[in-house]
Amino acid sequence: MKTLEELKAIRDRKISDLQLRKENFEYRIAVGMGTCGIAAGAREIMTTLMEEIERRQLKNISLTQTGCIGVCRLEPLMEIQDSKGEKVTYVNLTPEKTKKIVVDHIINGHIVKEYTIGYAEDINK
């Protein structure tokens, strides 16, 4: 078991990390975790994001969950907002699509247009 001092040090580091993520983010990612999103697989998307962020040691990300975003037929989905306030909504996600979004959008700054809500809406017309 850890000593009280070790546990306090771990807590302080995590609080510091969380503060940095709140104040100095490059991207804020929100995964739709309403009942519709969860039923469609949003938990797996959230888990994939957490694993990819940790594996790639990305420090400039704020990852949160949100309720229903309002497009239940396109779940699971996530919104990515950059530090300038520009937002992209990705829909019909899978773990594989999520990993591609992390590499292409988060790391390399290129929106994966074929996974966006605009692309999905154009195809459905």
Image (cartoon, rainbow, N blue to C red):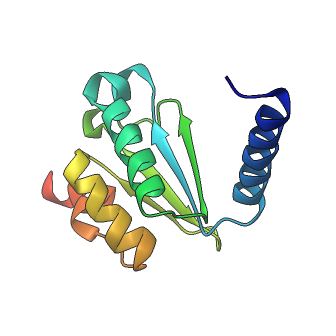
Residue 45 in view, yes or no:
yes
Horizontal placement of 3 versus 36: left or right?
Answer: right
User: Which quadrant is the C terminus positioned in?
Assistant: bottom left
User: Which quadrant is the N terminus positioned in?
Assistant: top right
Q: Tell me if residue 30 comes above or below residue 21 in the rendering.
A: above
Q: Nearer the viewer, residue 49 or 109?
A: 49
Q: Position of residue 22 (x, y in %)?
A: 74, 54
Q: Position of residue 124 (x, y in %)?
A: 15, 51
Q: Position of residue 58 (x, y in %)?
A: 52, 64
Q: Nearer the viewer, residue 112 or 117?
A: 112
Residue 125 in view, yes or no:
no
Q: Quadrant of residue 5?
A: top right
Q: Tell me if residue 67 comes above or below residue 49 in the rendering.
A: above
Q: Quadrant of residue 59?
A: bottom right
Horizontal placement of 21 versus 111: left or right?
Answer: right
Q: Nearer the viewer, residue 69 or 82?
A: 82
Horizontal placement of 88 versus 36: left or right?
Answer: right
Q: Tell me if residue 62 comes above or below residue 37 in the rendering.
A: below
Q: Residue at x 40, y 48 (%)?
A: 51
